[in-house]
Amino acid sequence: MTTHDILVSAKQASEALSLLDREKIDHALGIMAEKLIEHTDDILAENQRDTEAARGRISDVMIDRLRLDEKRILAMADGIRAVAALPSPIGKVLSRKKHPNGMTIEKVSVPIGVVAIIYESRPNVTSDAAALSFKSGNACVLRSGKDAFRSAYAIVAALREALSECGIPQEAISIVEDTDRKSAVELMEAVGLVDLLIPRGGGGLIRSCIENAKVPCIQTGMGICHIFVDRSADEDMALRIIENAKASRPSVCNAAEVLLVHRDIAKDFLPRVKKRLMDDRVAKGLPPVELHLSEKAAEYTDGVPASPDDFDTEFLDYKLAVDVVDNIDDAIKHINRHSTSHSEAIITRSTVNAAKFTRGIDSAAVYVNASTRFTDGGEFGLGCEMGISTQKIHARGPMGLEELTSYKYIIKGTGQIR
């Protein structure tokens, strides 16, 4: 099918979804989870083809992002079940007012309609986006990147089989079959067919959507996340958090990319950072983190010189830009200047500085003494996530069910005229 045909079918399916009751939606989600597990071998076979085709063209950490195994498929199924267990976001009376003439005016949550998602090399986005869209009464049109297409297509086939068994239009979950740029542009320009466009991927994809989309678009994904180690920090805690935030999974958007250290502790602390992230990891047979040091940071430890662009780069790799700041005010200014408004953290014992940091940082998620890696729909109790919005209008931070709804006013009268 052409992309246009898929969108037309999705629009028709969205009208049918708006009439489904919660019990049928939740039952279908349970069957979708079962079908994922039932088709594990098929999905893994297609994923193997994807990873083999991508090897040598993308980095090892991005291969890990693309790769599926039985454990990850089980986690995808669990994510669908978690979404099914959440309260329905549809039909909620958000407010109710009585007009002086006796009419009742209700503000009620409703589905958005057709949600299109353009994403790159993470196959699990396929099931997360489908489950959240379906639970919130929206039809979804998925446009996977070329590297993950076979995996995504196999996942969609399993989910659509579940819909068919439940007597629900399969077009409620669709995948664009063309992975060329043309199909992405078609989604961006599909006025009247796409009600919301969500890009999930690197800076280039997000900029392209923001600059070219003619349909409503939410900016998500790109994360230049910072950790500031204050002079009162528990340094052992700081080292644990830094290693987790940077190295537990460097290819994801909530991984730390920049470390800022207060000048008063830099002399002793930065050599400890180098030992923890480089020397100790090599000794354990783990990939070391390459430290990209500013001129100030290079006074205190060894690494490679930071380029002018390093503090504006989402590495998605075992690399960390490091700078030294004179005080918390300079840290806040640095972060707000270079951040993509995703996730930032302060490590401190000072309640005053913690409060100042959380007030002063203009990002979707701000942490005190915790890893940025928790910015995730599952960790925030949303079941899974559609993406992490870094803008301020409509949705901010991990996007779950509530963020996939709009509202309308329902007015009930007894013959009133104006």
Image: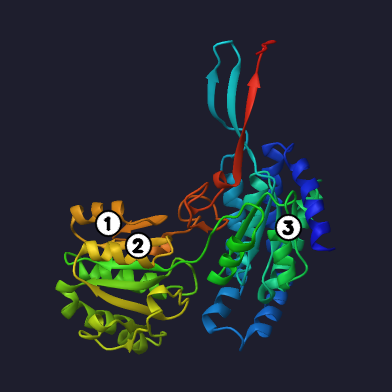
- 213 horizontally vs 291: left or right: right
Which residue is disc 3 drawn over?
A: 159
The quadrant of the image that shows the N terminus is bottom right
- 59 horizontally vs 188: left or right: left
| Residue type at numbered disc 2 | Asn
User: Closer to the N terminus: mark 3 or mark 1?
Assistant: 3
Q: Nearer the viewer, mark 2 or mark 1?
A: 2
* Residue in front for this viewpoint, 133 or 131: 133
Q: Identify the image's colour scheme: rainbow, by chain, secondary structure or one colour.
A: rainbow
Q: Is residue 320 above or below residue 380?
A: below
Mark on residue 336?
2
At x 81%, y 59%, the residue is 4
| Residue type at numbered disc 1 | Phe
User: Closer to the N terminus: mark 2 or mark 3?
Assistant: 3
Q: Determine whether the residue tagged by mark 3 lies in a helix, strand or loop.
A: helix
The residue carrying pointer 1 sits among few (fewer than 14), some (14 to 19) or many (20 or more) residues within 10 Å by Cα, namely many
| Residue type at numbered disc 3 | Leu
The quadrant of the image that shows the C terminus is top right
Q: Position of residue 296 (x, y in %)?
A: 23, 81
Q: Determine whether the residue tagged by mark 1 lies in a helix, strand or loop.
A: helix
Q: Position of residue 12 (x, y in %)?
A: 80, 46
Q: Position of residue 404 (x, y in %)?
A: 60, 47
Which residue is disc 1 drawn over?
A: 357
